[in-house]
Image (cartoon, coloured by chain):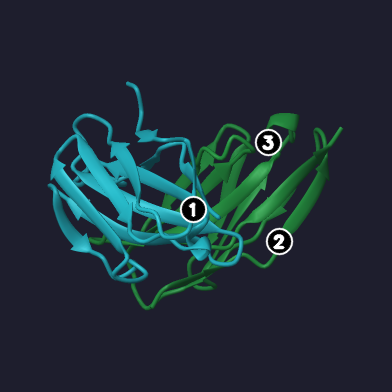
Amino acid sequence: DAGVIQSPRHEVTEMGQEVTLRCKPISGHNSLFWYRQTMMRGLELLIYFNNNVPIDDSGMPEDRFSAKMPNASFSTLKIQPSEPRDSAVYFCASSRSGSSYNEQFFGPGTRLTVL
Amino acid sequence: AQTVTQSQPEMSVQEAETVTLSCTYDTSESDYYLFWYKQPPSRQMILVIRQEAYKQQNATENRFSVNFQKAAKSFSLKISDSQLGDAAMYFCAYRRLGNEKLTFGTGTRLTIIP
């Protein structure tokens, strides 16, 4: 199994630019999660999908952030316009809901730097 | 709201010794899951061990074991025979039964001294 795939691994952009982070969950998993990790706030859940439907987006910081899951094998997290305070590592994770622990498997993360 | 507290920002242990990382949580639920994740310098989050709240027996995975005290809402991780590869950030996490949302603690950075 390839695991959760995220791209790009690193992204450097300038303030005001649009940023799109991509995630491919593990095949057969039907839940997908986007997390943000910063020194100040630790690991925060931004949004999660179940069967491609957003279930909880209460962690999305503001309207500049949006996430989509057009099909079971792909999701995007978009920031428009980006700001320096968005600099963080963004993780995608997936799980198979209904399994005993619903264990979440994490991707390698995308390190975003907004200048 | 559920909260997870890791009161030790940093810990260090001599190689081959035993170390215990602390975690406490706050919840009004009776059924839930607890997890310890490891994040090495590669930044990949790796599940180390997990515990179901209704199980009284403490979970064990090779050199990793937990001390789960439900009444005290405590979930500590014990690493025996510490190895250099154990050096990482360790995160405690909570998930309520029937909800997929994980709540993480702030993490403990573990250093292994050769």
> Distance between the Cα atoms at labels 3 and 1?
37 Å
Tag 2: amino acid: Pro
Q: Mark 2 vs mark 1: same chain?
A: no
Per the rendering, the colour in which chain A appears is cyan
Q: Which mark is residue A77?
A: none
Residue type for callout 3:
Asp
Mark closer to the chain start, 3 or 2: 2
Residue B41 sits in quarter = top right
Colour green belongs to chain: B
A3 w.r.t. B32: above or below: above
Provide residue A41's location: percent of width, then percent of height. 54, 66
Q: Quadrant of residue B63?
A: top right
How far from the left and from the top, in percent, is residue B28? 37, 78
Q: What residue type is disc 1 on?
A: Glu
Q: Which residue is mark 3?
A: B86
Marks 3, 2 in one chain: yes
Give the number of the disc on residue B9: 2
User: In what element is the residue under mark 3?
Assistant: helix
Q: Quadrant of the N terminus of chain B?
A: bottom left
| Pointer 3 chain | B
Which residue matches tag 1? A14
Can you say which quadrant of the picture contains the C terminus of chain B? top right
Residue at 17% in and 58% down: A54
Question: In front: mark 3 or mark 2?
Answer: 2
